[in-house]
Amino acid sequence: MSVYREPFGSTRDGQPVEKFILGCGGIEAEIITYGAALRALRVPDKSGASRDVVLGYDAVAGYEENGGYVGAVVGRYANRIADAACLIDGERFPLEANEGPKQLHGGPEGFSRQVFRPLDAGEDFVTLSYASPDGQGGYPGTLELWVTYTLTGRGLSIRYEAVCDRVTHCNITNHAYFNLDGSDSVLGHRLWLAASRFTPVGPDSIPLSMARPVAGTPFDFTVEKPIGRDIGREDEQLKNVGGYDHNFVLDPAQGLHLAARLVGEHSGIVMETWTEKPGIQVYSGNFLEATGGKGGDYHPRQALCLETQFFPDSPNHPEWGDILLRPGRRYDYTTEYRFSLE
């Protein structure tokens, strides 16, 4: 086990950015303090070679200049909120819009745009922290956030912890783009989901209802299938967002539970996503366009996001469950990516 810490340039306004390199049991992860982003994740493939399975950039400028939230921690509230406003105990709070009239991933100054502070590091982990000020993105309260990346020997664990001095909404996830083959397309990867329902959306990507059965639709991944098998079918939901960009409602389970299994077409790498959250956003990179990436530019459907989360637009649907973070409570959720070979 090992941990290395080194400079990773600086932001356009001169803030220094650092990189941490964790190694354990043949798995290596790189985390930068800009956006607390997962820049690289190297795991052994079926030939024994080390393969980087996430997208990332060669310099801080790539993260600042490109969209897509590549590898970043996103919040204060991940995913989309309609009309850039939310309800808190019946009171309506205006939020900062950054996707037309909607807010996406916490607004224009969300966590993905912030430089986190290194708090602690050991042989197999690093903890980064950030203080989100009262009113950032429109959210009430000063929120203290800690993100801990830990190599477990079989994969990578990400623990999110937060407290706030006022009642607020909090929904934090990682926006890593996975390609287990290091190839130009993720459509040949096979995907299984522990989800018999998904959240349908309109052309604006805002939920039409909380859940709809996946049975008989292109959204049925209850039996493992290639991502590209049904992505081109004549289906209103696919047309609305250009492919898969939907929340899947995970079948009820307690504690850390298996949500997804992704298998590389050529590498033989199997990645399981485990979570304590009730949903997972599957995004097939429909509009991914970026320059300055590791090994070249990025293009649509080159990688897949599996974002564990509360449901999109939940802050406007208290009937979907109480997800408010209140003073005296602690937001504490973990996601794990576990690796094996076919």
Image: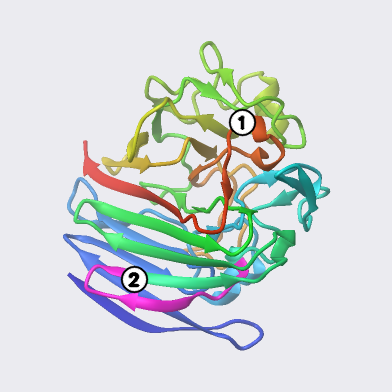
Q: Is residue 230 visible?
A: no
The image shows residue 45 at horizontal and vertical percentages of 24, 49
Disc on res. 320: 1
From the image, tell me which residue sits under label 2: 126
Residue 236's place in the image compared with 291, above or below, is above
Q: Quadrant of residue 142?
A: bottom right
Q: Is residue 177 in view from this perspective?
A: yes
Of residues 253 and 103, the one nearer the viewer is 253
Residue 115 or residue 292, whichever sits in front:
115
Residue drawn at point x = 52 percent, y = 37 percent: 282
Q: Is residue 251 magenta?
A: no
Three-letter amino acid code at disc 1? Trp
Give the left or right position of residue 340, taking residue 112 as reference. Answer: left
Q: Residue at x 42, y 78 (%)?
A: 118
Residue 118 in magenta stretch: yes
Dividing the picture into quarters, in which one does residue 166 lie?
bottom right
Towards the viewer: 202 or 137? 137
Q: Residues within 10 Å of mark 2 (few under 14, many from 20)?
A: many
Q: Secondary structure at mark 1?
A: helix
Extreme residue in the front direction: 328
C-alpha gap between disc 2 and disc 1: 34 Å
- 54 versus 227 height, above or below: below
Q: Position of residue 185 (x, y in %)?
A: 48, 43
Name the kind of residue labelled 2 in the image: Val
Query: Is 315 left, or right, of 282 in this rendering?
Result: right
Residue 324 vertical position relative to residue 328 in the rendered view, above or below: above
Q: Are marks 2 and 1 in contact (CB under 8 Å)?
A: no
Q: Position of residue 254 (x, y in %)?
A: 35, 33
Locate the C terminus by quadrant: top left
Residue range corresponding to the magenta coloring: 113-125
